Image (cartoon, rainbow, N blue to C red):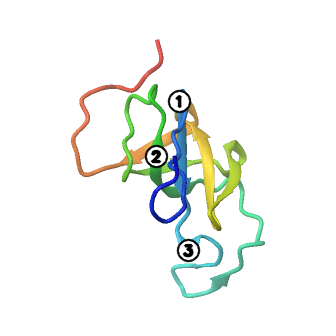
Amino acid sequence: MPDDKGKQPITMLADRLLVALPASEGERHSRSGILIPATAQVAKRLVWAEVVAVGPSVRSITAGDTVLFSPDDRYEVEVQGEDYLILRERDIHAVASERIVTETGLYL
């Protein structure tokens, strides 16, 4: 059912994550200050993004965490005019979070 702004809530399924890329993800600067355009080819550069929503089977990540993943392992989606990515938990390489996690996060 739509909320008061006409938007419908989104529920992620299984081990899926909905993430938002930072606005600065396109161009970047080297340490010496050289501007590197978004179209420049870099060998398998991993990307950080903020988690917006998680599915019920996600074990080690919560909304608000920042995750590191390969741009090759993503699906792009537009929701209410905003661009997001859909990832699987197993495609995440690292998680940056304020909380301490004692689990290994391994699939056994």
> Dividing the picture into quarters, in which one does residue 41 lie?
bottom right
Of callouts 3 and 1, the N-terminal one: 1
- Residue 69 against residue 14 in the figure, above or below: below
Q: Position of residue 84 (x, y in %)?
A: 61, 57
Residue pictured at 51% horizontal, 46% vertical:
1
Residue pictured at 59% horizontal, 70% vertical:
25
CA distance separating discs 2 and 1: 11 Å
Q: Which residue is mark 1?
A: 15
Q: Position of residue 67 (x, y in %)?
A: 46, 49
Q: Amino acid at mark 2?
A: Ala
Q: Which residue is mark 3?
A: 23
Circle 1 Cα neighbour tier, 10 Å, few/some/many (<14 / 14–19 / ≥20): some
Circle 3 Cα neighbour tier, 10 Å, few/some/many (<14 / 14–19 / ≥20): few
Q: Amino acid at mark 1?
A: Asp
Q: Which residue is mark 2?
A: 53
* Disc marking residue 4: none
Q: Amino acid at mark 3?
A: Ala
